Amino acid sequence: MHIEQQLDEVKNVVADALKFAQRKGATHAEASMSRVEGIAVSARLGEVENVEFTNDGGLGISVYVGQRKGSASTADLSPKALQQTVEKAVDIARFTNDDPCSGLADAALIARTIPDCDLYHPIELDAKQGLALALEAESVAMSADKRITNSDGASYNANLGLRVYGNTHGILAGYPSSRYSLSCVVIGEQDGEMQRDYSYTVDRKAHRLHSAQQVGEEAARFTLERLGARKIDTASVPILFSRDIASSLFGHFISAISGGSLYRESSFLLDSKGKQLFPNWLCIDEKPHTPAGLASSPFDHEGVATQDAVIVDHGVLQDYLLTSYSARKLGLTTNGHAGGIHNWQISHTGESDQQLLAKMGTGLLVTELMGQGVNIVNGDYSRGAAGFWVENGVIQYPVHEVTIAGSLADMFANIVAVGAVQECRGSISTGSVLVEKMHVAGH
């Protein structure tokens, strides 16, 4: 079936669910439905390990009886099952308490024109071709060096899907999307010590994935570079977060400025709007309609229109990340963040990776983080880390089994530089981030 036909079919199901909810006594209702078709294949040590075909979908509905809310979902999309799901949601709503903050997003904020974000680039879901790519990536990695002794496998994923959202304020809209990825993980051994590392590539367009050759070569190189890792002495030194993990720093920032954390008073950034949190050169822009962006969306999970925004302007926080519920709790207006952020772009200071090392001088280049030792309530940060010891701007040797610690507020305020080479494989595009000083616990 052509994708436009599928979209129309799903829109009809969502529209029927909304009408049925109102007939059953709902004041308002919202429903979303997704369909996904995909393959996931993996290989290990030259053998096919897994071949999965996905073809599923589901509908979720929330109904409001006055200001009482009930929600239900189903993967069975037969008319009878859909009616039962709606009835359950209405029944649940009748037994919940009134909540003055519940309800649909304000009608004035609902998306009325739906921009095309260029998210759908279908190719044939060919398991044989996917396995060939996975096997090639692993073969390249395994043959790169005799110290590469084992593999945790390589995998290829392809997903074609669509999502439709509708509510009783009049929106009934949807869009298709595609996503492809290839990854490889290998293990290296030297002098009785083993290390593992990986490489991956992801894109909306299959032809823009890195080649299997490149993924395999990178997986091998990253693993070999970690061999011979040592511990280091405890010290306070500059930390350079490599660009592929630097996005996690901004992930903690997202948690701290999200409406849910703020109205529960469980964030160290309470009452921070309009305050200087980062250096005055740092800006964070959000671009929800970036063509083929991995986090692009014409509207959020409540049907609210997404739009370009400046989240941080010259170090100053401009806005929180709000849903309708959290916005009402805070006496504010939602800004289209139900379901998360949309393509953050972190500004940079222009340095290459080599120039960042030179700027750091002596310190720790962190390439891997472990553990969950981050407290958003008070901003304490403590995580296991691995990477490379750097002296006079030159990498000396790999480092493992250390812990880096500090406070997120200090880390944000003391970012010295952000590299010009950006990591773009997710919802946050950022270069490597140099933090002035953190505590490193080693020996």
Image (cartoon, rainbow, N blue to C red):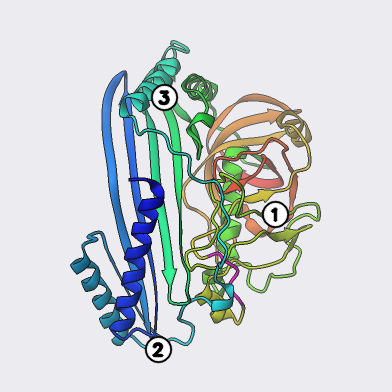
Main SS of the magenta part reads loop
Residue under the point 33% across and 37% down = 39
Q: Position of residue 240 (x, y in %)?
A: 67, 39
- Where 280 sits versus 83, above or below? above
The span picked out in magenta is: 333-337
Where is mark 3, residue-wise?
A: 186
Q: Amino acid at mark 1?
A: Ile
132 and 173: which one is in front?
173
Which residue sits at x=44%, y=18%? Answer: 141
Q: Which residue corresponds to the image point at 43% horizontal and 31% vertical from the top-left?
A: 183
Give the quarter of the image for residue 367. top right
- Amino acid type for the residue under numbered disc 2: Gly
Q: Position of residue 359 (x, y in %)?
A: 78, 35
Q: Nearer the viewer, residue 196 or 430?
A: 430
Q: Identify the mark nearer the N-term, 1 or 2.
A: 2
Q: Is residue 93 magenta?
A: no
Structural crowding at the residue carrying mark 2, measured as other residues with C-alpha within 10 Å and reported as few (<14), some (14–19) or many (≥20): some
391 over 284 or under it: above or below: above
Q: Nearer the viewer, residue 285 or 272?
A: 285
Q: Which mark is residue 193?
A: none
- The part of the image, by quadrant, that contains residue 284 is bottom right
The three-letter amino acid code for the residue at tag 3 is: Val
Mark found first going from the N terminus, 1 or 3: 3
Residue 28 shows in this picture: yes
Q: Is residue 115 left or right of residue 92?
A: right
